[in-house]
Image (tube, rainbow, N blue to C red):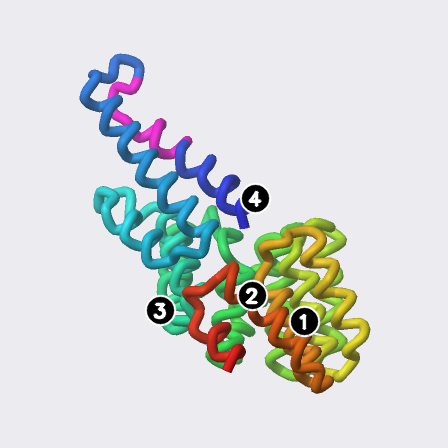
Amino acid sequence: LMAALTSAASVSSSSVLEDQPGRSGASPGKDVALVSLLRKLGEAVHAMHRYSCQEALAALRSLPSREQSSALVQDLTARCYFELADYAEAVRLFAQCCRQHPFYRTLGLEYYSSALWQLEDNLELGKLARQVLERDRQKPQSWCVVGNSFSLQKEHDQAIKCFRRAIQLDPDFAYAHTLIGHELMATEKYDKAVQMYEAAIAIDIRHYNAWWGLGNVYQRQEDFSNAKYNFQRAVDINGSNEVLRTSLG
């Protein structure tokens, strides 16, 4: 999470600095405004890292309207709604970000495609998969999009191949490991699914999706004690997600 946000923040910060009129001779007032802007943006990023999504949204809404239309802010806002399991709003905002900022289209693509998967929007997910392959096959996020498209069509082996390609491009991409785990779960290969979820957690111990995946495996195996433990770990990380809380019963 933080790696993606830090990368996006560096892009946004550069844009902010470049957009300051007469930057070389900026007045103290403009410098104060810039510091305030970056402070609020930092608050939003840190809140998102804690999965305090409502707090992050409040910080983002307090930004000037010009900054709210930036690629970073739109991506962060969409991500907040994704983590809140409001997939329809997440899709709307991710789509808006892609239209308005095509240069930064890799921002949040893995979550955009997962939100489309949750909504079972096969048409839009297929269209997004074709677009990302045309634009950049060397981004791991692109292969997550394509993998999610195959997954929604129940082509689990093809989905796994795509997610493995994402891992080849970025071995520390925890989300791709988890998505493979989900596909293995769908084909009842529970032991292999556990290995993928554990690999994701080894990369990022706060990757709640993998903790939830482990809980789901143990629940399927009727090991309810371990299921509850892992579901609780997921909720402890992201308590704002209603779907996770429901898993605890």
In the image, what residue type sits under mark 4? Ala
Residue tagged by mark 4?
A: 3
| Dot 4 or dot 2, earlier in sequence | 4
Amino acid of disc 1: Leu
Residue at mark 3 to residue at mark 2: CA–CA distance = 23 Å
Q: CA distance from mark 3 to mark 4?
A: 24 Å
Q: Which badge, 3 or 4, comes first in the chain's sequence? A: 4
Place of residue 82 in the rendered image (x, y in percent of width and height, measured from the top left): 44, 65
Which residue is denoted by mark 3 in the rendering?
Answer: 89
Contact between marks 1 and 4 (CB within 8 A): the answer is no
Task: Tell which tag, 1 or 4, sits nearer the viewer.
Answer: 1
Secondary structure of the residue carrying numbered label 4: helix
* Secondary structure beneath label 1: helix
Q: Horizontal placement of 200 versus 20: left or right?
A: right
**Which comes sooner in the sequence, label 1 or label 4?**
4
Question: Which of the two marks, 3 or 4, is nearer to us in this view?
Answer: 4
**Relative horizontal placement of residue 180, taking residue 37 as reference (left or right):** right
Q: Residues within 10 Å of mark 1 (few under 14, many from 20)?
A: many
Instruction: Give percent across and percent down for residue 53.
Output: 38, 58
Q: Tell me where residue 22 sits by quadrant.
A: top left
